[in-house]
Amino acid sequence: MTDLILKVFIKDHNNTGDPKVRTKYGILSGCVGIALNVLLCLMKFFVGSVTGSIAITADAVNNLSDAGSSAVTVFGFKMAGKPADRDHPFGHGRIEYITAMIVSFIILFMGVELAIQSVQKIRSPEDVRFNLVGAIIIGVSILGKLWLAFFNKNLGKRIDSPAMSAVVADSLSDIAATSVTLIALIISKFFPSLHIDGWLGIIVACFVLKAGFDIFKGTLNTLIGTPPTKEFVDEIENKILSYDHVSGIHDLIVHSYGPGQVFATVHVEMPSDLDVMIGHNIIDNIEKEVGAEMGIELTVHYDPLEVNNERVTELKELTLRVVKGISEELSIHDFRVVDGPMHTNLIFDVVIPYGFKDSPHEIITEISRKISEVNNSYFTVIKAEHSFV
């Protein structure tokens, strides 16, 4: 079904790397959402007025807000698809995150409104009248929302869209809310004076509020800046290490300016005695080939290492044993040895995980002490840093 809709409305729909195609995906998702939610809203208003159920009426209003969310999604994708310009050299992709956040605000607002109406219903209960047609319409509504959730999940997966993920979460909360409403309607047939409509409305409100909060939290974290996934880090590391003369990578930093607008920098370790032109060509190939394969703008820094010097290798292994003796979570890179007339400087960076029990100063002091115990002519010059991945 999804493939058929895509073929009808989006030419070249498989070319999801094209910003124009991506924008069409977002507009299609929003338009389908608007049409379905308006239809469901009208149906539920009718059922709510016939049965006297506040939960059903509130659910209808929620569908109307969903139509508004879909309209916001359409606008967000149109804006996010604008090309880079003088004022925004990295493009407008982050507008998609802002769109997801606006959707979360709409969901939270409707959750609060529903909770207020439900409390009023608890204070002034009214009988809910069971209606078979109404129950059928609500069942159809659940199926429609389920289809919409799968439809948007499919589209969102194809273009890796946070805004569509927000729409999916919204649809799932609606499914839960409407299911609770259907349960209340069925119970009213057998226990008409039970008056649980308001209490179930509170349950629906909790579902809606949680969905809104989860979307807000996830989008806010993305805007603040989250690390790349382990799968991304492993993939880029494996690809770079497959090149000749590359012995390791470190200081990988990834910046996202929206889906499809990812910039990354990384330090690549290669032998210091390698011909500079060969090393430069390798760097160029990594930037072009790995960047194209992973859909990122990649910048590589060349770190020369003395890999053929046995003494440097032994001192590096000694230092690594000392560091790992303090904690297996610690690691080192950029190791160099500078000999002087009275002592030998061991220069390197130590990577400390976030939340580590000891402070950077304490770790550096401990490493220096342990290395000097091995040989008091060894001095350490250590830079402490945190990983960005």
Image (cartoon, helix red, strand yellow):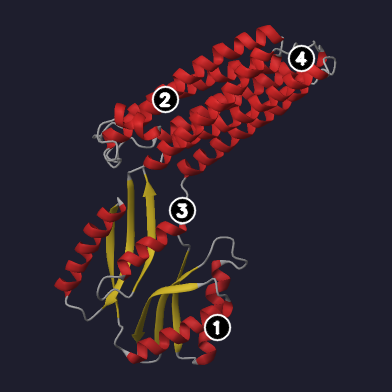
Name which residue lies at 72% across and 28% down.
203
Q: Is mark 3 in CB contact (under 8 Å) with mark 2?
A: no
Q: Which residue is mark 3?
A: 227
Separation (CA) of disc 1 from disc 3: 33 Å
> N-terminal of the two: label 1 or label 4?
4
Distance from disc 1 to disc 4, alpha carbons, whole Å, reads 69 Å
Per the image, the residue denoted by label 2 is 30
Q: Is residue 258 visible?
A: no
Q: Amino acid at mark 3?
A: Pro
* Labels 3, 2: front one: 2
Nearer the observer, 65 or 33? 33
Question: Nearer the N terminus, badge 3 or badge 4?
Answer: 4
- Count residues near mark 3 (Cα–Cα under 10 Å), then give few for <14, some for 14-19, many for 20+: some
Amino acid type indicated by mark 2: Gly
Mark closer to the observer (1, 3): 3
Percent across and percent down for residue 283 are 22, 65
Say what amino acid the circle numbered 1 marks.
Answer: Arg
Residue corresponding to mark 1:
369
Sequence-earlier tag: 3 or 2: 2
Q: Position of residue 359 (x, y in %)?
A: 58, 66
Specify few, some or many for label 1: CA neighbours under 10 Å numbering under 14, 14-19, or 20 or more: some
Instruction: Point out the image quarter for the C terminus.
Output: bottom left
Q: Which one is in front in this view, the residue at disc 4 or the one at disc 2?
A: 2
Q: Which comes before the other along the chain, label 1 or label 3?
A: 3
